[in-house]
Image (spheres, coloured by chain):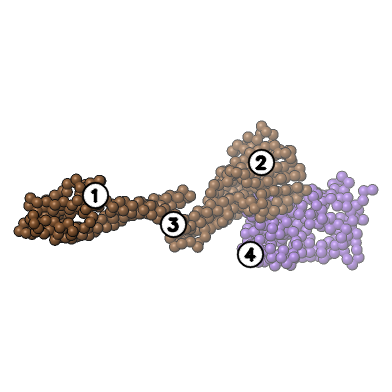
Chain colours: A purple, B brown
Amino acid sequence: MRLLIVEDNVALADELTADLQRAGYAIDWLADGRDALYQGASEPYDLILLDLGLPGKSGLEILREWRATGMNCPVLILTARDHWAERIDGLKAGADDYLTKPFHPEELQLRIQALLRRTHGQVNQPQLDVGGLQLDEAQQTVINAGEAIELTAAEFSLLRYFMLHSGKIVSKSQLNEHLYDGETERDSNVIEVHVNHLRSKLGKAAIETKRGQGYRFIGVSHS
Amino acid sequence: MMRALNSIQQRLGISLIAVLIVAGLLLAQMSLWLFDQGLRRYLENHLQDEAELLVAALARGANGIELDQQHISASYHRPFSGHYFAIHLGEQQWRSRSSWDFNMPAPAQPGLIEHLVDGPQAQQLLVVRADYRRFGKNIFIVVAQDYTPMLDSFRRVQWIGGGFGLGTLMLLVLLQRYLVARALQPLEQMRAQIAQLQQGQRTTLDAQVPQELAPLVEQINHLLQHTEDTLTRSRNALGNLGHALKTPLAILFSLANRPELNAHQELRDNLRNQLSQMQERISRELGRARLAGEALPGAYFDCAKELPDLCSTLQQVHRRDLQLEWHADAGLRLPWDREDILELLGNLLDNACKWAQQKIMLRMELEQSHYRITIDDDGPGIAPELRAQVLTRGARLDEQMQGHGLGLGIARDILEHCRGELILETSPLGGLRIMILLPARRS
């Protein structure tokens, strides 16, 4: 999952980036509103964390312009403005969630997870539960029939992406775009290696290869 | 305001009536007096002529000087006709037959006697003495005429004039009331507009007023604008301050979460605890400082406009299968700042959403002397014995009833500003009912 953080406070942006990277997200960071307006709409982000008081262009304006052009990437507003009147304005402008500063990092993680699950059609679930597997996003492990399986950071990110796109064909370039931030060198061989690791942990049938198209996550069957 | 208007009206009325009565009476009395004087002068001349005729009627006869009765006007023969004379010629004296047994007065000076003389049969006489010299002798003649018919007609004129004057006065008073009411119309309009302002039905006064009121209206509008600007400015400043404080707090929260601190759990808990307290305090104080309270008379909260957005926001925030319903009287507007009321409802409804199983019901209505807001939920509610504690300032129930405490704290701050009260009850839905009474301001 690739996230864009739009935040003009460098220290907070650093903290957020570090926190979210630990949680297995690929993070891009922008501080200026005008850059965010362009890049948020042109790059395939899975979620955008948007501050409202930005230099260049205010967060609400950016959001309205995005939504007016049909950009539907989920947006979580992260702001110090904690009044209901402002909250209403934010959600009316097209935000999917609204979190006020200061916040507990765990709370932010939970909101991001819930928002991603919701965007991919998994409404009201406390945990990612797809194809007979439960993903524990806090521990970065996967539970298969009650047994916790350790995952490396890369495997965890990959599996989460697969589970959120369960049943759909996912191309290698798509995986590259969504698992790495804008500055990482992308190498599709690396993806293949991680997919094989996942197969060895979950069983060969868990991830199907569609020749020339990509992969499809099937999951495990317990019968 | 109504009373002041009346008093302007009354004051103008009373002074007008007083001036009219005094001026009218003086004028009427003066003209009557002048007319009376003119009439007396005229009659004096007439009586002088009569005296001259009488002198001419004296002639030397067989028995000395005699009065030729042929030459005397008939009215001197009819008893008590109102025309009398007496001629004094040395020892000799003639009296008109009309005077009968009445003794004519003999004034000492020639000319008209200033006052009226009592005559026979309650007549009031105008008496003139004229002196002549004839037949080598001094003659003086006293001629009198009854003045009562004149006095009677004067009295009649006074009555008629009085009645006429009174009628005119009443007409004038009515006219004056109408004119004053018309002239004060702009004041009355302003009064109505100020009432609307207080009820939140308008934000400025109409500037189309007569020249005399323009500075007042301008000044009020200016003050309103100024208050609104000040409020906006201070809200912006508070927003910036909040941003400046909360962003570092967010960083600190994140730092406290660093894996490096995993080994020092106690230190981390301590940090988090202190940070949470700071956060709560900052939110509460900044929130309180933001409140407009009653500073803005033109502010209002339009239920039908704001509630749908608030409810959909709450639905979106809670993401549960919640039935959040609201009902408000048609066109209901609360005369308080929009953000204050949104904050009040937002916090209370947010709590209700946290605790409700499924249903939350918001009702807003105007009763005679107050607006009543009720928020019902079907959650666990608060036991009656704990309710007082929840409402007490500084109650440490915050931790036990996470959420309820803080939301109620902000709500209490807002209600303090709006002079409202908050009552906790058991809801018919089974959970907690929060009832808020806000005073409806009188116009």
Whether discs 2 and 4 lie on one chain: the answer is no
Identify the mark nearer the N-term, 3 or 1. Answer: 1
> According to the image, label 1 marks what residue?
B80
> According to the image, label 3 marks what residue?
B175
Give amino acid for label 2: Ile
- What is the x, y in percent for residue A160? 81, 55
Q: Cβ–Cβ below 8 Å for labels 4 and 3?
A: no
Q: Residue furthest top?
A: B385
Q: CA distance from mark 2 to mark 4?
A: 41 Å
Mark 4 lies on a secondary structure that is loop
Mark 1 lies on a secondary structure that is loop
Residue under mark 4: which chain is it in?
A
> According to the image, label 4 marks what residue?
A57
> According to the image, label 2 marks what residue?
B434
- Give the camera-side residue of B397 and B334: B334
Q: Nearer the viewer, mark 3 or mark 2?
A: 3
Mark 2 lies on a secondary structure that is strand
Name which quarter of the figure residue A198 lies in: bottom right
